[in-house]
Image (cartoon, helix red, strand yellow):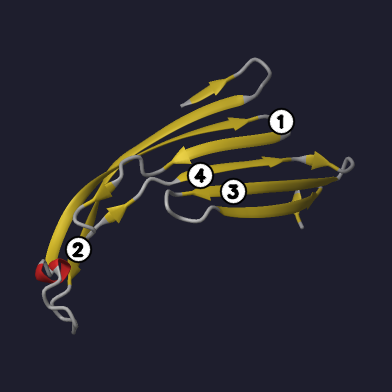
């Protein structure tokens, strides 16, 4: 969904819903602990519901967005472990002159019990051509 704002900026929202099917067959492996519960449940198949949300703000010279593609944590006896992830991204268009534009951007990824990840990028365009 897109909302046009008075100053020509745009605020967008999105949602997703679906299912993922996870299968495993652990019976063909060699194990040192044959009494492990995961090995005893050697053939499993499960359908997992997945839901996500996101928001995006777009202005003339910058943008920022936040998304949570997996809203529900799901842990079925540690067989299928889906954790909630958060993504924050943004960027800016810096006009060097009438022809050159510097476009730095960043993506920050966060998941509980995992290290924070950051991607930093920078593009330069000349007359709307990526260099």
In space, the residues marked 3 and 4 are separated at their CA atoms by 7 Å
Residue position for label 3: 107
Verify CB contact (< 8 Å) between mark 2 and mark 4.
no
Label drawn at residue 23: 2
In space, the residues marked 2 and 3 are separated at their CA atoms by 31 Å
Q: Earlier in the sequence, mark 3 or mark 4?
A: 4
Label drawn at residue 60: 1
Nearer to us: label 1 or label 3:
3
Choose between 28 and 94: the one closer to the eye. 28
Residue beneath the point at 77% across and 58% down: 131
Pinpoint residue 50: horizontal percent, then vertical percent.
29, 44
In space, the residues marked 1 and 3 are separated at their CA atoms by 19 Å
Task: Locate residue 108 relative to residue 51 in the image: left or right.
Answer: right
Q: Secondary structure at mark 1?
A: loop
Residue beneath the point at 74% across and 46% down: 103
For label 2, the crowd category at 10 Å Cα-Cα, with few meaning under 14, some 14 to 19 and many 20 or more, is: few
Q: Secondary structure at mark 3?
A: strand
Q: Earlier in the sequence, mark 1 or mark 2?
A: 2
Q: Is residue 84 above or below residue 61?
A: below
Residue position for label 4: 87
Residue beneath the point at 16% across and 67% down: 38
Q: Secondary structure at mark 4?
A: strand
In space, the residues marked 2 and 4 are separated at their CA atoms by 27 Å
């Amino acid at each position: 969904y897109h909302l046009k704002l008075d100053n020509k900026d745009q605020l967008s929202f999105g949602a997703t819903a679906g299912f993922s099917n996870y299968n495993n067959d652990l019976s063909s492996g060699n194990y040192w602990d044959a009494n492990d519960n995961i090995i005893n449940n050697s053939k499993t198949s499960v359908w997992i519901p997945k839901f996500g949300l996101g928001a995006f703000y777009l202005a003339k010279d910058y943008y920022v967005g936040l998304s949570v593609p997996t809203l529900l944590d799901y842990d079925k006896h540690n067989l299928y472990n889906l954790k909630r992830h958060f993504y924050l991204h943004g960027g800016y268009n810096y006009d060097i002159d009438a022809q050159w534009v510097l476009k730095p951007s960043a993506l920050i990824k966060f998941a509980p019990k995992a290290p924070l990840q950051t991607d930093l990028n920078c593009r330069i365009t000349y007359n709307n051509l990526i260099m």
